[in-house]
Amino acid sequence: MKIYKGFTLAEALITLGIIGVVAALSAPSLVHNAANSKIGPSLSKFRTTFEVGSNMMMAKMNLERFHKEELGSEIANLNKYIKMIPYSENYSFKDAKGNNTYTNRSKEYYEKLLANYENSCSGVGVIFAQGQPFTNSERSDCLRTKQLLDQSFAGTIFQLNNGEIMVLIPTDKYTELFDKGSYKGILAEVLIDIDGNKRENKAGKDVFAFLLDANGSLIAAGSGAHKYINQKGSKYITSFSDECNLNTESLVSNFACTGKIADNNWSTTDLDL
């Protein structure tokens, strides 16, 4: 009588169960590694695209630099060289731990911008931001100001052709860099959400920070180049830090991961992210 050798049903089920357990344990790590491997190339491509577009725009308009007073309109002109459209939906992001939410539509944001409209809204910025009632005159003037601010805000957030979201945040202070080679001074902070407004929106994980120099270049926050110019004054990157740390609420440390990736030749290989 011929005897056939093979696996029993129980043995096959046990083997499949072991394979399933191993796959379940390793899948999150594989997904995490795959997502991380795309971060560096995405940031590098964004930086190159932005700088090439800036150079072409400035050459076409005979500009030697970006200007703080005209930054909004000059950035808007980039849409002729970079495929981007104003992003009118609400956008916010969190620190890497997810404990704090940051948005340009916050009370602090309006208070700060309204302070620039002293002629029309003098003394009522805080009241407006808190939603308290105005007199008729105050309401008329400040509603017009709010309309202008909303229009301005819409121009500071763009959705790029690949779905990424770019946020332009003018710096609080501006300092000429006379002894720093070709650098001319930081005008704005540029945040880039590499997967659009659809995933975590966390600093250092899918939202990264660059500093926009007046010469049109983007400097990765926390990079060696950032350390070299060592300029403060941006809204979130209030000081230089080369400590990339995603286990903290500190945005300075969260966004320093942008520089860590940049200094690693735009790669997350061998980086603890």
Image: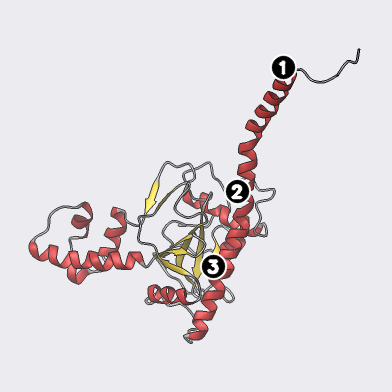
Give coordinates of residue 47: x percent, y percent.
Answer: 56, 66
Q: Residue at x 31, y 53 (%)?
A: 106
Indicate which label's residue lies in the foreground, 3 or 2.
Answer: 2
The residue beneath circle 2 is: 35
The residue tagged 1 is: 10
Q: CA distance from mark 1 to mark 2?
A: 37 Å
Cβ–Cβ under 8 Å for marks 1 and 2: no
Q: Is residue 209 visible?
A: yes
Image coordinates for residue 16, horizontal then vertical, percent: 70, 26
Please determine whether, in this image, residue 71 is positioned above or below residue 44. Answer: below
The amino acid type of the residue labelled 2 equals Ala
> Residue 203 location, x and y as percent?
49, 50
Disc 3 crowd rating (10 Å Cα; few below 14, some 14-19, many 20+) is many
Label number found at residue 128: none
Q: Which residue is mark 3?
A: 218
Q: Quadrant of residue 233?
A: bottom left
For the residue labelled by badge 1, is the local secondary structure a helix, a strand or a loop? Answer: helix
Which element carries disc 2, helix, strand or loop?
helix
261 over 168 or under it: above or below: above
Which one is earlier in the sequence, the residue at label 1 or at label 2? 1
Q: Is residue 17 left or right of residue 55?
A: right
Question: Which image quadrant for residue 241?
Answer: bottom right
- Which residue sits at x=69%, y=50%? 269
Distance (Cα) linking label 3 and label 2: 23 Å
Query: Farthest residue toward the bottom?
Result: 62
* Camera-side residue of 259 and 167: 167
**Would you say residue 229 is visible in this rendering?**
no
> Mark 1: which amino acid?
Ala
Of the two numbered discs 1 and 2 in the rendering, the one whose residue sits closer to the viewer: 1
Please give the count of numbered marks on the rendered protein.
3
* Foreground pick, 50 / 138: 50
